[in-house]
Image (cartoon, rainbow, N blue to C red):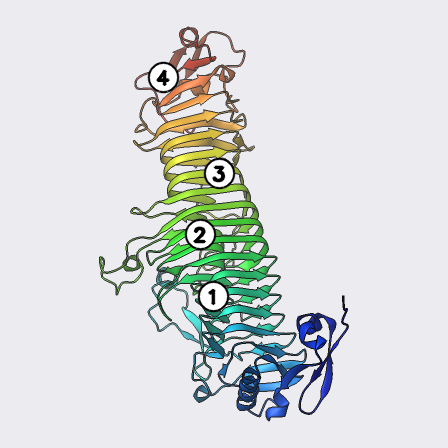
């Protein structure tokens, strides 16, 4: 076995040494002599920013490809260029101390990128140097029709706030890296900064590794300057990278801009730190086919306008996604960015529901999002985390496990749209296990419930902890509207809880409450009059009201409460309990006790229902 400390790289004019981390990849060639490198200075590059190095770099790449492959080397210095066309089997290496600048001359770009490759194989963009897009911005009143941020714009106008925003200056062009239908791609070690547009955009690529990169664009101004935007790629790994971008950090697409819409699949993201003035991680609204088989693990999100977004507007499918071991910090950025300081966001729409210019019925039907697991997350946010399906396409098989959410307001923000801590709507088969919601300071006047569940079919709510936003407030800790087929167990009410569970809707059915510790709730359960009788059963719970006699809350139990445990009564005497002038004969109730130690309870006709007092 041979151990290398360095490798001699021979060029036309010089012999130089590369360190051990570089020599490993070159060891095979080193065994037979020397690894040929193509130094761009041998092809006319000066290393001075004022001189265009485009022709020299391209000559070196072409010569390397003709030779069968190798390294194109940018030594320390400054190099300005327009579009550079990569070739198969070429490793473009930007050394530490070297910077490749995107030139401010659109005539130097024949493609929408500084570094471009199409139908290539075995290509590498690497080094410890920097690729700088030199993006610049100007601020002016918003003068474009952007349907995505139209609600924010209208809200700002209604509040009398200025709608000034940033726009890229017109003296710049292109992405930093655009790769079309390439195989065996490696991008490693480099810093990509100040891109005028998306930083790294692979379409239809296979076996892609992006490792140890640093991507940065202006968090205040960098509109459309995404970090990494894989489109229809498969077998993609993103790891050990730091991404701080004005627009989305990592955004998955399945679109037809460069060919047929391909599934974006078999993707891992791990050991990254992400910051974004938009979404740190987004399963894009641009999904015409599918995004599936994705795992995101051991990742830290800081200062993002939106933590993780699932947005599906073009009829595609998102499925088989695991998000684990994450910390999320979501804050509010300026009005023209997507997001609201929300750690989580799910949204299915049709394009005609977003863009006024698209006629309903001419767009794709609503897409699907299913089989998503989110586990081991600590999240801090300023806005509501909203998880919405679509009337025509409900979310399916969504699981959130061991999720801690901390919410506080930002008095500096021009507006605050937060209502509930977590909202779920139109979901089939939803599991929420060990989810905790905590309200912080400063407060917002619009806050209400910790958890809102609306139109859910098949719910497991296990180990939920939380309360309403305001101590003494009328909102329940958990509001459930039109929830069907649910098991709710092991919930725990926090001190200061008013009503814990409140049920509404005439389609509420088959609800089982089991083993919940609601002793600190003033009213454990309440319901609206339209909840059907027999829709809700409570068994095996510690549910004595926080105030009043042990049986007092039973007397106000609404229609729809069918079974309550003996634990409710604890050791109270068999007597008439009085609540608001209504009496309940406890001895009669006890007379129909079942072998399961459950008591059939039905409120007197005309008894007050859904009391929050």
Tell which circle, 4 or 1, labels the residue nearer the N-terminal end. 1
Location of the C terminus by quadrant is top left
Of tags 3 and 4, which is closer to the observer?
Answer: 3
Vertical placement of residue 328 versus 437, above or below: below
Within-10-Å neighbours for mark 4: few <14, some 14–19, many 20+: many
Residue shown at the point (47%, 67%) measured from the top left = 205
Q: Are marks 3 and 2 in contact (CB under 8 Å)?
A: no
Within-10-Å neighbours for mark 3: few <14, some 14–19, many 20+: many
* Badge number at residue 602: 4
Location of the N terminus by quadrant is bottom right
Q: Secondary structure at mark 3?
A: strand
Q: Secondary structure at mark 2?
A: strand
Task: Kindly tell me whether residue 501 is visible in this rendering.
Answer: yes
Work out whether residue 140 or residue 176 is closer to the camera in this orientation and state it.
176
Of tags 1 and 2, which is closer to the observer?
Answer: 1
Q: Which residue is mark 3?
A: 432
Which x, y percent locates residue 7?
73, 77
Q: Which residue is mark 1?
A: 229
- State the image quarter where residue 404 is shown: top right
Vertical placement of residue 179 versus 423, above or below: below
- State the image quarter where residue 286 is shown: bottom left
Which x, y percent locates residue 42?
63, 91
Q: Which residue is mark 2?
A: 345
Work out whether residue 406 or residue 320 is closer to the camera in this orientation and state it.
320
């Amino acid at each position: 076995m041979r151990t290398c400390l360095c490798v001699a790289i021979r060029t036309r004019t010089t012999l130089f040494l590369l360190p051990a981390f570089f020599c490993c990849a070159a060891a095979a060639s080193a065994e037979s002599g020397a690894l040929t490198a193509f130094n761009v200075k041998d092809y006319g590059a000066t290393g001075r920013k004022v001189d265009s190095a485009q022709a020299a770099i391209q000559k070196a790449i072409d010569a390397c490809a003709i030779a069968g492959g190798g390294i194109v080397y940018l030594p320390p210095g400054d190099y300005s260029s327009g579009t550079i066309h990569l070739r198969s089997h070429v490793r473009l290496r930007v050394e530490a101390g070297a910077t490749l600048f995107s030139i401010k001359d659109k005539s130097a770009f024949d493609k929408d990128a500084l570094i471009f490759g199409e139908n290539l194989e075995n290509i590498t963009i690497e080094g410890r140097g920097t690729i700088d897009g030199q993006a610049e911005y100007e601020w002016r009143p918003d003068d474009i029709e952007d349907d995505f941020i139209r609600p924010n714009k209208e809200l700002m106008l209604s509040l009398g706030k200025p709608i000034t925003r940033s726009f890229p200056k017109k003296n710049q062009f292109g992405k930093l890296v655009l790769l079309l239908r390439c195989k065996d791609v490696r991008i490693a070690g480099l810093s990509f900064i100040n891109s005028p547009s998306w930083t790294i955009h692979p379409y239809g690529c296979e076996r892609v590794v992006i490792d140890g990169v640093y991507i940065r664009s202006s968090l205040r101004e960098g509109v459309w300057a995404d970090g990494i935007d894989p489109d229809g790629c498969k077998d993609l790994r993103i790891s050990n990278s730091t991404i701080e971008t004005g627009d989305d950090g990592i955004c998955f697409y399945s679109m037809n801009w460069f060919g047929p819409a391909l599934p974006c699949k078999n993707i891992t993201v791990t050991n990254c730190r992400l910051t974004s003035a938009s979404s740190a991680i987004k399963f894009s609204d641009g999904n015409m086919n599918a995004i599936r088989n994705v795992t995101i693990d051991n990742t830290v999100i800081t200062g993002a306008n939106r933590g993780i977004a699932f947005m599906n507007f073009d009829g595609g499918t998102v499925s088989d996604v695991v998000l684990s071991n994450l910390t999320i910090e979501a804050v509010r950025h300026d009005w023209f960015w997507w997001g609201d300081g929300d750690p989580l966001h799910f949204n299915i729409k049709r394009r005609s529901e977003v863009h006024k210019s698209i006629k309903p019925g001419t767009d794709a039907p609503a897409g699907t999002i299913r089989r998503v697991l989110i586990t081991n997350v600590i999240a801090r946010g300023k806005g509501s985390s909203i998880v919405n399906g679509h009337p025509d396409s409900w979310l399916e098989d969504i699981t959130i496990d061991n999720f801690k959410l901390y919410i506080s307001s930002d008095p500096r923000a021009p507006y605050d749209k937060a209502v509930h801590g977590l909202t779920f709507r139109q979901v089939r088969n939803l599991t929420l296990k060990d989810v905790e919601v905590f309200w912080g300071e400063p407060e917002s006047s619009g806050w209400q419930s910790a958890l809102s569940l609306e139109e859910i079919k098949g719910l497991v709510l296990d180990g939920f902890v939380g309360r309403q936003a305001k101590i003494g407030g009328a909102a329940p800790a958990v509001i459930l509207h039109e929830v069907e087929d649910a098991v709710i167990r092991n919930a725990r009410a926090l001190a200061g809880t008013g009503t814990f569970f409140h049920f509404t809707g005439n389609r509420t059915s088959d609800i089982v409450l089991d083993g919940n510790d609601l002793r600190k709730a003033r009213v454990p359960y309440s319901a609206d009059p339209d909840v059907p009788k027999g829709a809700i059963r409570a068994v095996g719970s510690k549910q004595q009201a926080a105030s009043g006699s042990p049986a007092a809350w039973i007397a106000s139990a609404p229609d729809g409460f069918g079974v309550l445990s003996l634990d409710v009564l604890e050791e109270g005497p068999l007597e008439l309990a009085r609540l608001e002038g209504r009496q309940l004969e406890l001895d009669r109730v006890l007379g129909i006790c079942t072998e399961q130690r459950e008591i059939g309870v039905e409120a007197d006709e005309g008894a007050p229902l859904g009391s929050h007092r």
